[in-house]
Image (cartoon, rainbow, N blue to C red):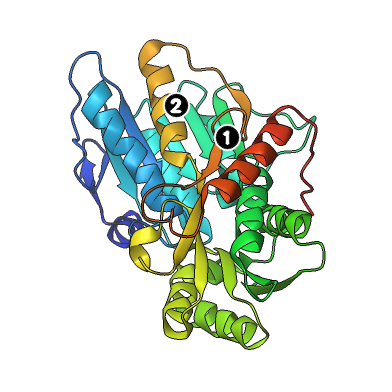
Amino acid sequence: MATMVARRFGVRLFCVSALVLLVSACSGGGETSKNEGSVSVGLVFDIGGLGDKSFNDAAHRGLLQAKGELDAAFEYIEPAEGSEREAALRIFAAGDFDLIIGVGFLFTDDIKQVAQEFPEKKFACIDITWNEGDALPSNLLGIKFREEEGSYLVGALAALVSESGVGGFVGGMDIPLIHKFEAGYRAGFERVRPEGKVLVRYAGVTGDAFQNPTKGKELALAQIDQGADVIFHASGSTGLGVFEAARERDILAIGVDSDQQSEAPEHILTSMTKEVDVAVFETVKSVVDGTFVGGVQVLGLAEGGVDYVFGEQNARWIDDEKRSLVESMRQEIISKKTTVPIR
């Protein structure tokens, strides 16, 4: 059984004795040994894995930064769905790793359980599912983002540049986390264009909804046929299909999590970024510094946890007047004059 799991994860298992296994996961540039004073990080990617050009790639950038600036060693696993996530966490927890990170809300239950069983290790979960009052193991840091705040700003931008007054939203999995993106986008769009309309579709109700570009293109084309000329996606690699539709029909799209301008250079209005790379780097740094504390961190506009991309590549669509309006909306949120809905 151990051999089967090892092959599926791409890991090597070395038998040290009849009772002990030392595990080393395949790394994409991480080192299996660590220098004195450094830390070793084991990270398990979300659905879609490395190369999604969005959420997972942002986490990987954080690892690379930690390696370069903090001399941290890292290794990662790209599991499939279901029990493989828990098994991947256990592989790292049983090995010589100081910090184990699960990337994505789907890790919530598994990482809480594993953290309880390995109290001497430190754990972090990006996008943890957590409600006020929920208890977490003291060695687990849960990181959440106020996605609705960044989505509100890109919704405003969409409304400002839309010629039809119709925006589109393509979500991945139909769950509360992605509803926050939808709600913020809709609220920002309607703040600028009260008479406007936002069309909404989701790719599915399982994890596959985050890795289905064909479905993403199909949903985007349907919205374009209904008049949408700016479409925001929050759907992982499913969004690559949205970009393909934007290129074919010559409309604008909005990326998510990372700056996705390079995916369709003439058709990306902006991207709503979640600073997952910063969150990963700062978590590793806290372990290096000895300041790691379990609990929950919630990162929004005020904390620099979310934002939108603005620069030379999209200044053609976002002139000074539009930029000024959106920045004033940012300040309203930071000063708590505006509260962005989450559903």
Front residue of 200/230: it is: 230
Using residue 40 as the reference point, say whether residue 100 is left or right of it.
right
User: From this viewpoint, is residue 24 visible?
Assistant: yes
User: Residue, x 56% and y 28% (percent of image)?
Assistant: 140
Where does the N terminus fall, quadrant-wise?
A: bottom left
Whether the residues at callouts 2 and 1 have beta carbons within 8 Å, the answer is: yes
- Residue 176, given in percent of the width and then of the height, sits at 72, 55
The type of residue carrying mark 2 is Thr
Front residue of 44/183: it is: 183
Q: Residues within 10 Å of mark 2 (few under 14, many from 20)?
A: many
- Residue 40, given in percent of the width and then of the height, sits at 30, 28
Using residue 204 as the reference point, say whether residue 190 is left or right of it.
right
Where does the C terminus fall, quadrant-wise?
A: bottom right
Residue 132: which numbered mark, if any?
none
Front residue of 224/318: it is: 318
Residue 143: which numbered mark, if any?
1
User: Residue, x 43% and y 71% (percent of image)?
Assistant: 240
235 versus 285 height, above or below: below
Query: Tag 1's secondary structure?
Result: strand
- Residue 84, given in percent of the width and then of the height, sits at 46, 56
User: Residue, x 55% and y 35% (percent of image)?
Assistant: 305
The type of residue carrying mark 1 is Ile
Of the residues under marks 2 and 1, which one precedes in the sequence? Answer: 1
| Mark 2, residue position | 283
Front residue of 335/161: it is: 161
- State the separation of the CA atoms marked 2 and 1: 10 Å
Q: Quadrant of residue 328?
A: top right
User: Residue, x 24% and y 13% (percent of image)?
Assistant: 37
User: From this viewpoint, is residue 128 visible?
Assistant: no
212 versus 281 height, above or below: below
206 versus 77 height, above or below: below
